[in-house]
Amino acid sequence: MHNANGSVDNKQLRSFGLIFAALLIVIFAGLLPWLTERAIPRWPFWTGVPVAVLGLVWPRGLLPLYRVWMKFGEVMGRINTFIILSVLFYLMVTPIGWLMRLFGKDPMRRQLDAAQQSYRVPSTGHDKAHMEKPY
């Protein structure tokens, strides 16, 4: 969302302010009270409306909030990435490895063989026509 030089323009800040305010009001004054069957709180309006007005009148005033929000998003992105990749690894890659060990598969051919002089596997070359139509 940044420009090429890393700065944020007024249009982006205005858009951020309006979207931030709308989501704040919709989630905390609409969706959550409806799901929990509680009264609609006032604080989302007290927070969201000034942010929206500031975004329309003076977008540069939202720059500190924007930077904090982007840092928060970066941290959450790293945490989510770690969680998602960990789950994928432990639920997919690990069982596949266990199955391969169970059935004696070793695609990397890591077995030691004292009679072998080298573990080098000669590559099979392709002719020049192979790259003319790669797809």
Image (cartoon, rainbow, N blue to C red):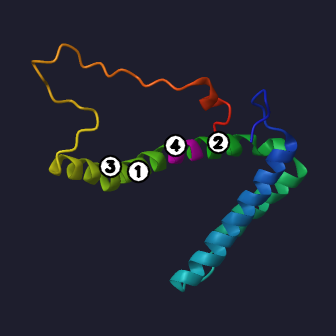
Tell me the residue at 61%/77% (across/down): 31
Residue 125 on the magenta span:
no
Which numbered disc, 4 or 3, marks the residue that appears first in the sequence? 4
**Prevalent SS, magenta region:** helix
Q: What element carries label 3?
A: helix
Residue farthest left in this picture:
114
Identify the residue position indicated by label 2 in the image: 135
Tell me the residue at 63%/80% (across/down): 40
The magenta stretch spans which residues?
A: 73-77
- Residue 75 is marked as 4
Identify the residue position indicated by label 1 in the image: 83
The image quadrant that residue 62 belongs to is top right
CB atoms at circles 4 and 3 under 8 Å apart? Answer: no
- Mark 2, residues whose alpha carbon is within 10 Å: few (<14), some, or many (≥20)? few
Question: Tag 1: residue type?
Answer: Ile
Question: Tag 4: residue type?
Answer: Val
The image quadrant that residue 91 belongs to is bottom left
